[in-house]
Image: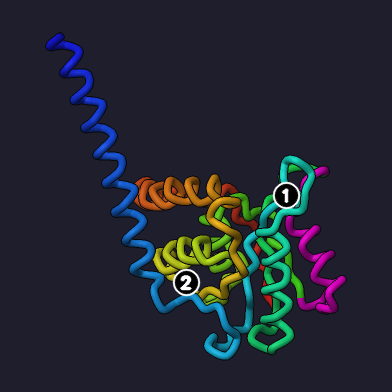
């Protein structure tokens, strides 16, 4: 019985410890990003480049991904309102069958954005990679991140740590019920931000410099 009680106490202590870590990491990122993300065009300042963070166009069940669709809409709004001059699309290009940047570019062009105003980062495998490469490969010192608010907040925190001045334009989110899995995953992704910082994690690829002009 004593051994069982000790095991229960250890499990409870680990659970409480994990919960505290999740809460603290979430609080730090939320606090830093406060006032740095915008949901209306009238409030957001102009930046030369808007960085669209990639995601899959379709869900695993084959249905349209609302996160994707809403990022496309937000990007078009920002560009049309002359709040950005160029678009950098950063996403996963893991295989010939899966290419987030090219898919997003195709849909942006279909919405009327000139192809020559869109630049592609094929090595944005993670948000960390996207932010670091925006500075080190594409030579940016400031930019507007385009994604859902929770994602923008994390991206802005990473950007600041890497010496990149970033603000966020929030694409429309989806209901908590429909996006529960994504929201839960975000809490752990925020813990990973601090682990990456402690371990000085680097992007998977760097590559030649690319000038956006």
Q: Main secondary structure of the magenta part?
A: helix
| Magenta stretch bounds | 97-117
Q: Where is residue 26 in the image (x, y as percent from the top left)?
A: 36, 56
Quadrant where the C terminus is found in the figure:
bottom right
Label 1 environment density (alpha carbons within 10 Å; few <14, some 14–19, many ≥20): some
Residue ID at (57%, 83%)? 40
**Mark 1–mark 2 distance (CA, rounded to whole Å):** 24 Å
Q: Is mark 1 on a helix, strand or loop?
A: loop
115 in the magenta segment? yes
Q: Is mark 2 on a helix, strand or loop?
A: loop
Which residue, given by chain and number where applicable, does mark 1 sit on?
93
Say left or right for 88 vs 117: left
Residue ID at (67%, 66%)? 71
The extreme top residue here reads: 1
Residue ID at (83%, 74%)? 111
Residue ID at (41%, 48%)? 196
Say left or right for 23 vs 79: left
Say left or right for 96 vs 149: right
> Mark 1 or mark 2, which has the lower sequence index?
1
Q: Position of residue 122 (x, y in %)?
A: 70, 55
Residue 213 in view = no
Label 2 environment density (alpha carbons within 10 Å; few <14, some 14–19, many ≥20): many
Which residue, given by chain and number where applicable, does mark 2 sit on?
164
Instruction: Kindly indicate the quadrant of the structure image that contains residue 174.
Output: bottom right
């Amino acid at each position: 019985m004593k051994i069982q009680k000790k095991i229960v106490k250890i499990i409870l202590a680990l659970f409480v410890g994990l919960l505290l870590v999740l809460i603290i990491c979430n609080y730090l990122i939320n606090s830093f990003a406060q006032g740095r993300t915008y949901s209306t065009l009238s409030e957001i300042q102009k930046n030369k480049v808007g960085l669209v963070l990639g995601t899959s166009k379709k869900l695993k069940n084959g249905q349209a991904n609302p996160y994707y669709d809403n990022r496309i809409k937000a990007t078009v709004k920002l560009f049309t309102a002359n709040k950005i001059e160029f678009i950098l699309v950063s996403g996963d290009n893991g295989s010939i069958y899966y290419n987030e940047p090219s898919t997003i570019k195709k849909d942006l062009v279909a919405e009327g954005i000139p192809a020559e105003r869109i630049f592609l980062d094929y090595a944005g495998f993670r948000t960390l990679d996207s932010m670091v490469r925006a500075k080190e490969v594409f030579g940016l010192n400031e930019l507007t991140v385009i994604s859902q608010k929770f994602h923008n907040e994390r991206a802005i925190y990473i950007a600041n740590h890497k010496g990149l001045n970033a603000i966020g334009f929030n694409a429309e989110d989806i209901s908590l019920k429909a996006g529960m899995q994504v929201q839960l995953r975000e809490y752990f992704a925020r813990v990973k931000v601090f682990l990456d910082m402690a371990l000085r994690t680097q992007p998977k690829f760097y590559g030649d410099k690319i000038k956006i002009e």
